[in-house]
Amino acid sequence: MSTTDIKRSQPNLAERWRNVQFFFDTTMRVRLESLIVLALLCTAMTILSPFFLSLSNFLNILLATSTIGVLAIAATLVLSSSGLDLSLGSVMGLSGTAGAALVVEAGWPWPFAIAGSLGAGALAGYVNGQLITRARIPAFIVTLGMLGIARGLALIIAPNGGAIYGLPDPVVYLGQGRPLGIPSPVVILVLTALFAHYLLAYSRFGRHTLAMGDNEGAARATGINVERLRRTLYTLSGTLAGLAGLIFMARVNAGDPTAGISYELTAITAAIIGGTSLFGGKGSILGTMIGALIMGVLQNGLNLLAVQSYYQQIAIGSVLILAVYIDQFQATKERKS
Amino acid sequence: MSLLSIKGVVKRFGPIEVLKGVDLDVEAGSVVGLVGDNGAGKSTLMKTITGLYRADEGRVSFDGADITNLPPGARRTRGIEMIYQDLALAKQQDVAANIFLGREPSKRPLGFLPPIVDKARMDIEARAMIDRLGARIPSIHRPVGMFSGGQQQTVAIARALTFAPKLVIMDEPTAALAVREVESVLALIAQMRKDGLAVILISHRLNDVFEVTDRIVVLRQGRIEADLATKQTQMREVVGYIVGAH
C-alpha cells in the first residue's frame, strides 16, 4: 500500500506514460503506440515520397484499406472472443464469385449480387460456428479447413476458374461510385466500423464477447450462452467477409475466385497492431481501424517506393510477429503488476 | 418446505458415477457446511445446483419449483449464486463489468436508438456494493486482474450479492486469503444468515466450517455420509466421516 502511495505522489516518467496509455486504452479505446506508429509511418513516407502527401493519395489509401478494413473488423470480433478465423480471405473470394455468378451467369436480378455475396459469407461462417461449437473441433482447424474449402468452391463456381466479368451498374456503384466525392467502399467501411464499434463497445453482445474471450468458464457460470454467442460471432465474421467480397467484386467489376488470397494475414495483423489481443478479452474497432490504416499506409508507401509485392508480404508478416510479441510482453507485464 | 431440495441426484461422466444418489435440503437462513475429501463429488454436486451440469437422474427443486432442467442463467435469475474457488472473473474487464456480467442493464439513448449498456449506472451500483462490503479497491475502473487476491474475491462476492440472491454457494472462499480477510468473509456469512439467505460453504478448513455453520454435511464417494448439527458434533467425528472411519 505504502509503495503505491509514494509512486502516486511523485509520478515518474514511466508512471505518467502508463497513465496516458491507460487513458487512451480505456477512454479513447485506441492503443497509444499504434497512433504513434501511424504518425511515424506517415512522416517517413512524406519525406521518402513526394506523392504521398495529397488528398488523392489519401483517398487511395482509404480505398485500398476498405476491404482489409472490413475483414479486420471481422477478425477483431472473433479474436476478442478468443476465437480465430483463418478463412476470411477465402470466404471473401467465394462470396464475390458467388454473387457475380448469380447475376452474370444465372441471370438473376442485380440485388442477388449483394444477397448472394453476403449469404455465401454468412453460410460459410455459420458452418464454421457449427463445427466449432457442436463438433468441438478447434477453431484453428475448422477455419483452416474452410480456407481451403471456400477457395476450392470459388474456383469451381467460376467458369474455368477465371473471373466473372460484366456486373450491372448498381452493383458496380458500390465499388466505384463516389457519393459526395467519397468512394463508396470507404463509406461502407465507415458505416460497418460504426456498427461494429457499437456492437463491441456498447452492446451487451460485445460485453459478453469480451468476457467470453477473457474467461469462458466465468461467462458460462454467469449464465451467458457461450456456444450460441460463438456461433453468432463466426456467422457475423463470415458475413463481413462476404461484405468485403462484395466491395472487392464491385470495385474491380468482376467476381474473381482468387480475390483475397492471404488477406486474413493482413486483417489479423491490422486487428492485433490495433490493440486487439490474440488471447481474447480485449478488442477495439477504433484501434483496428488505426491498425488497418497502418497496413494501408505501409502498402501504399511500399508501392510508391516501387518495392516489389513479395517484400511487402515479408513486411506484413514481420509486423504481425512483432505486434504479437509486444502484446505478449505487455500481457505478462500486466499480470505481474 | 426447504428452499433447496435435492432428491436422488445421480451424475455420471462416461462410465464413472460421481454422484450416486444424493439427497440434500437447505433451509433459508441457514448455513450448511459441505465437506469431504478431494474427489468426493462436492464441486460436481454444486454444479448440478447452479446448472453448469444437468443431473442424469433425480430432481433439484428451488423455492418450490423444479429447476432440474434449467440452464445456469435461469437459475441465477431465480436466486442461486455461486462464488467459485477460482473466482470466475474476467480479469481484463473492470469491476462493474464483472459484477454485472451476464446481467448488464441497458438503456435506449433518445428512446429509440439501439440499446446500449448503462455503464454509468453499473459503475454507481458497483461502487455502492463494494463500499457496502467494506472493501478497499483502488479504482473500480481498473481491470480486476490488477487487484490482489482478496480484492478480487471481494469483486466475486459483490457479484454474487448484487442481485438479491436466496442461496449463495461458496467454494473454498477462505483458501487463498490472509487471516484478517478470512475473518471478514466469515463475518459476512454470519450476516447473510441474519438476512435470511441460505449459504452452502465448501471448505477444507474445518475450523472455519465449525465457526459459521448450522449443519455439516459430509460427502464421501458420491454419497451423503453424514448430516450433522454443528453444535452437536466435534472435529474428530467429522474427520472420521470424511475418511470413512465410521
Image (cartoon, grey):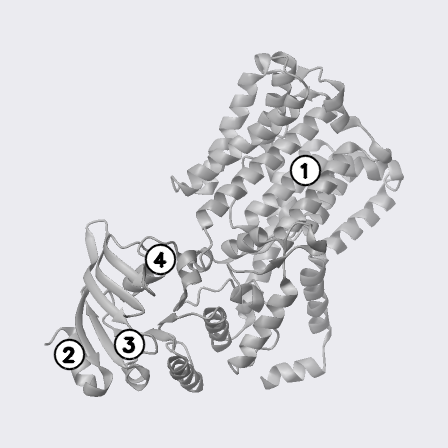
| Quadrant that contains the N terminus of chain B | bottom left
Same chain letter for marks 1 and 4: no
Secondary element at image label 1: helix
Is residue A101 depicted above or below A25 in this figure?
Answer: above
Number of residues whose C-alpha sits closer than 10 Å to that of mark 2, classed few (under 14), some (14–19) or many (20 or more): few
Chain identity of mark 1: A
Secondary element at image label 3: strand
**Looking at the picture, which amino acid does disc 1 mark?**
Ile
Label 3: which residue? Answer: B33
Secondary element at image label 2: helix
Direction from residue A305 to residue A331 in the image, left or right: left
Label 2: which residue? Answer: B240
Can you give x and y, in whole percent of width and height, for residue A178 in the image?
83, 31
Chain identity of mark 4: B
Cα distance, mark 2 to mark 1? 66 Å
Tell me whether the residue at label 4 lies in contact with that at label 2, contact meaning CB atoms closer than 8 angstroms: no
Residue drawn 57% across the image and 71% down it: B126
Number of numbered discs on residues: 4
Direction from residue B26 to residue A24 in the image, left or right: right
Same chain letter for marks 3 and 1: no
**Which quadrant would residue B31 be assigned to in this image?**
bottom left
Chain identity of mark 3: B
Same chain letter for marks 3 and 2: yes
Label 4: which residue? Answer: B51
Asked if residue A317 shows in the view, the reply is no
In front of the other: B111 or B26 = B111
Label 1: which residue? Answer: A68
| Quadrant that contains the C terminus of chain B | bottom left
**Looking at the picture, which amino acid does disc 2 mark?**
Gly
Is residue A134 depicted above or below B83 in this figure?
Answer: above
